[in-house]
Image (cartoon, rainbow, N blue to C red):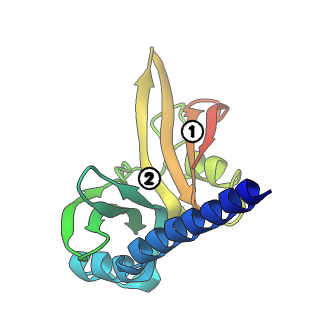
Amino acid sequence: MKRIISLAAIAAVALSLGMAAVSAEAAKLIGETKAKEIAFKHAGVNPQQVQFKKMKLDKKYNHTEYELEFYVGSTEYEYDINAETGEVLKFSREEKNRATPQTAGPAGLIGDAKAKSIALARVAGAKESDLRKFKLDNDDGRQVYEGEIFYNMKEYDFKIDAKSGEVLKWEIGN
């Protein structure tokens, strides 16, 4: 009986020490809100215009960092922020909307405007500003509109037949 009580006491002490270590480590982190502020300030963007794609806390071999991906308009930003110091470790900025300027398609094609409306109609609440990488492409001899919609923390990849308007591919990712 003494042995069971001793084992229970040892387990309780070990558990509380483990929890204290986790709490101490978490207390050293700057937090998600501060990481966002640092990224927005560094990027020079208005926080009200930001659409988040992803944010996660990642442990590397010698440090912990926040990985952020977000859009402002058609520009995608990626940041790695040191979770303890707030230092910007890595960042990139890439223009994602490569829409062709035409609205009416070449003879026989449905056109950009129609293709965009077909894709956007499948995502309730999405607007044209949520489109990414939209372009007219040749896919094995078949002309298609392809692109990506980012809305409500989800990514929608699509291909639409440029002549018929038929949706050939529709994938939803996180």
- Residue 100 vertical placement versus 16 (above, below): above
The secondary structure type at the circle numbered 1 is strand
Left or right: where 90 falls relative to 7: left
In the image: residue 113, left or right of residue 139: right
Which of 74 and 62 lies nearest the eye of the viewer?
Answer: 62
Report if residue 20 is visible in the image.
yes
Q: Residue at x 47, y 68 (%)?
A: 22
Q: CA distance from mark 1 to mark 2?
A: 11 Å
Q: Position of residue 73 (x, y in %)?
A: 40, 69
The image position of residue 4, as x and y in percent, is 75, 55
- On screen, residue 17 above or below 154: below
**Dot 1 amino acid type:** Phe
Mark sitting on residue 132: 2
Splitting the image into 4 quarters, where does residue 28 fall? bottom left
Residue for point 72% across, 61% down: 124
Helix, strand, or loop for circle 2? strand
Answer few, some or many: residues within 10 Å of disc 1's Cα (few below 14, many 20 plus, some between 14 and 19).
some
Camera-side residue: 15 or 116?
15
In the rendered image, residue 65, in percent from the top left (x then y), is placed at 32, 63
Q: Is residue 126 visible?
A: no
Which residue is at the far right?
Answer: 1
- The extreme front residue here reads 2
| Label of residue 53 in the image | none
Of the 4 image quadrants, the one containing the N terminus is bottom right
Query: Residue type at mark 2?
Result: Arg
Of the residues under marks 1 and 2, which one precedes in the sequence?
A: 2
Q: Which residue is denoted by mark 1 in the rendering?
A: 158
14 to the left or right of 33:
right
